[in-house]
Image: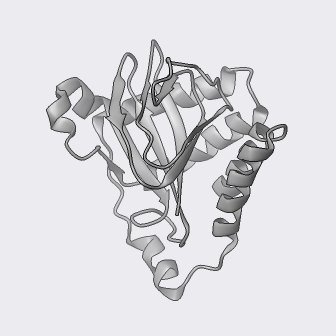
């Protein structure tokens, strides 16, 4: 149900954007590959954990459902909320260096990929949740990445100013570009995908 909702939300977000549609098609191709015996067995190996930031999930999901944005985003947020108790939430490595508010105010989880509920090659799909009034630090990584935004929030890429893609919007980060995100008065919720 989650992957079906994810595909529907991506389809809605890329309907009029052929360049971003190509990214989504790459992700879909990865998700369509059969799982290996090893990865199929690994799905049950995730031990669920919860972090302090998870207390903001219900509010973030409610905001997604009430946003008036794409109905596909609301359905995706609801599917995520239903799966949340099965997820292994984790903090960004080195989060302690950014203070207690950041350490306890953000949580990430793998949905598809190593450490996720399902392991497939070619793509990793995860979830980020941040408390209100929190900024995720500048970072970069070699894989190409795109986010499907499920809540109010602001994003920055390279030397650009902060921008708000809106609920149901996409944010694309080319390989190795410096990027960041921040929550304003409401918690930030987004799905991210890394493409190999």
Q: Residue placed at 50% from the left, 17% from the top? A: 161
The one of 145 and 53 positioned closer to us in this rendering: 145
Furthest-front residue in this view: 159
Where is residue 58 shown, x and y percent of the image?
50, 31
Where is residue 120 shown, x and y percent of the image?
54, 72
Q: Residue placed at 52% from the left, 87% from the top? A: 37
Q: Is residue 48 above or below residue 166?
A: below
Where is residue 73 shown, x and y percent of the image?
69, 36
Q: Residue placed at 51% from the left, 33% from the top? A: 189
Q: Is residue 96 left or right of residue 195?
A: left
Q: Residue placed at 40% from the left, 36% from the top? A: 178
Q: Is residue 89 left or right of residue 25?
A: left
The one of 133 and 1 positioned closer to us in this rendering: 133
Where is residue 136 shown, x and y percent of the image?
35, 30
Furthest-bottom residue in this view: 37
Q: Is residue 17 above or below residue 175?
A: above
Furthest-right residue in this view: 16
The one of 101 and 30 positioned closer to us in this rendering: 30
Q: Is residue 73 above or below residue 22?
A: above
Q: Is residue 131 left or right of residue 22?
A: left
Q: Image quadrant of residue 19?
A: top right
Quadrant for the N terminus, please: bottom right
């Amino acid at each position: 149900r989650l992957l079906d909702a994810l595909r529907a939300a991506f389809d809605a977000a890329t309907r009029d954007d052929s360049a971003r549609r190509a990214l989504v098609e790459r992700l879909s191709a990865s998700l369509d590959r059969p799982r290996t015996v090893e990865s199929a067995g690994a799905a049950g190996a995730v031990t669920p954990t919860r972090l302090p930031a998870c207390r903001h999930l219900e509010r973030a999901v409610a905001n997604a459902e009430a946003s008036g944005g794409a109905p596909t985003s609301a359905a995706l947020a609801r599917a995520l909320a239903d799966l949340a108790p099965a997820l292994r939430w984790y903090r960004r490595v080195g989060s302690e260096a950014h203070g207690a508010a950041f350490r306890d105010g953000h949580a990430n989880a793998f949905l598809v990929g190593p450490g996720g509920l399902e392991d497939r090659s070619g793509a990793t799909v995860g979830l980020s949740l941040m408390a209100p009034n929190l900024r995720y630090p500048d970072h970069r990584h070699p894989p190409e990445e795109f986010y499907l935004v499920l809540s109010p929030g602001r994003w920055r890429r390279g030397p650009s100013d902060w921008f708000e893609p809106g609920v149901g919007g996409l944010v694309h980060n080319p390989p190795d570009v410096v990027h960041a995100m921040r929550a304003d008065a409401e918690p930030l919720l987004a799905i991210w995908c890394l493409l190999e």
